[in-house]
Amino acid sequence: MNLPASRLLTAVLAGAALAGCGKSAPSGAGGYGSGSGGPLAQVSTQGAAGLSTKNTTRLGGSDPTTDAAAVARATYPGLTSTTRPQAVVLVDAHNWPAALAASALASAPLSAPLLYSDGSTLPAASSQALSAMHPTGAAQAGGAQVIRIGEATAAPSGYRTYTLAASEPPALAAEVTRLVGRARGVAPRQVIVLAGDGPPALEMPAAGLSAESGAPILLVSTTTVPAATSAELASLHQPGIYVLGPSVLSGHVLTELARFGPVKRIGAISGQGASPVENAIAVARFADGAFGWNIHEPGHGLVFANLARALDAPAAAPLSANGDYGPLLLLDDSSPPARGSIPGASIPSVLASYLSDIKPAYSPQVPPVRVAYNHGWLIGDERAISAVTQAEIDALLETSPRASASEEPSLPLAE
């Protein structure tokens, strides 16, 4: 029997994932028990493992709610006391600015994963993940196991809950900023500012940067600085202000922000033709002293999401603050190739070039086991990122022999 190319790849990847663990996929949802552990909760037909290749791992399924549950379970399996989170953040999937601001709570010391509600309803995937992770309670939030972002968010029964109740996104982002400060015991010295009414695809990389750095996100509009944001910036006494997507902000907004602290711009300039894909790469490359990803070499985790699924950015934020700490990179994979066809390159050329720049390489003097490796997390199912794109990413992340005698191999890992 001849299978179309993409179906064959999917079958091979799924088989490899099952063969690697020597077990079949779980057939039911598991929960946290009083013993040493239990089965992983199945948050989609792919579970929390998804499809994997040698250099990539896919998490999630058909929607951001499932993706968030899968990322949360991968970050916190909940099988031992050390793999349970202190608290879980719950946010309404219909409130994009609130979800983006909530990404800061994935940073240390709270390190809280994020789940989505559907208004006041808790979807099955979120409920199963919450039950399986069994959060211990965060002392910094009054012992809360669930931190609700906004009054419209579901309030699951049986959990100690802490609610940030502001109704407007700028005020809610300011509340998140204050909670980050209380959790750390010191007010933030850096903040990320972006337009809550700007293009979501340009704002998506802020989620991972906030989670990694701990710099909370404050919201302005493209033309004004809301009173809640002004008040919060004033209370921080001249913080470093990093503006992501500055080209969508008016000159008036940038001037107003400069009253509260030094302003530095992050990201590509969309007014000069830069795309969301290029903007995400610029964020991954950016550094200002110790702030920023500053990724110009191999040896990193990388998170890939479809730029059309904005809510996948906050969902994936825990992967930027745990494990191999990856920045968010974006793909435009909205039109995967027809099944049965053998497509050409489906990764944007600018992204392929960046991945090639940080591709690990080895030489006879520096063998493969001594170099740094890259690993990719792919968020969502094949409708978000096709299996062919996954295979292409895998090849670009692969450690390979250097192409010429003049090319330097990747630096070895420190002893």
Image (cartoon, grey):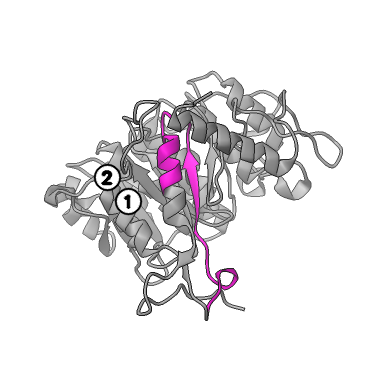
Spot occupied by residue 232 in the image (x, y as percentages of width and height): 36, 50
Q: Which mark is residue 280?
A: 1
Q: Tell me the kind of residue under disc 2.
A: Pro
Question: In the image, is residue 22 above or below residue 95?
Answer: below
Amino acid type assigned to the residue bearing label 1 in the image: Ala
Instruction: Report crowding for label 2: few under 14, some 14 to 19, many 20 or more residues within 10 A (C-alpha).
Output: many
Q: Compared with residue 235, is residue 305 higher up or lower down, i.e. above or below?
A: above
Q: Residues within 10 Å of mark 1 (few under 14, many from 20)?
A: many
> Which percent across, then down, holds residue 138?
66, 45
Front residue (pair 170, 328): 328
- Alpha-carbon span between mark 1 and mark 2: 6 Å
Figure quadrant of residue 41: top right
Q: Is residue 86 left or right of residue 175?
A: right
Task: Give the magenta part as a residue range.
Answer: 366-392
Q: Nearer the viewer, residue 239 or 242?
A: 242
Q: Assign the C terminus to one quadrant of the image.
A: bottom right
User: Where is mark 2, residue-wise?
Assistant: 276
Q: Residue at x 26, y 62 (%)?
A: 264
User: Left or right: where does residue 31 sit relative to residue 154?
Assistant: right
Query: Is 336 in front, or is 128?
Result: 336
Q: Is residue 371 magenta?
A: yes
Q: Helix or strand or loop: what does disc 2 sit on? A: helix
Q: Nearer the viewer, residue 153 or 363?
A: 363
**Marks 1 and 2 in Cβ contact (< 8 Å):** yes
As drawn, which residue projects farthest toward the front?
1
Where residue 74 appears, x then y in whole percent? 62, 42
Q: Quadrant of residue 236?
A: bottom left
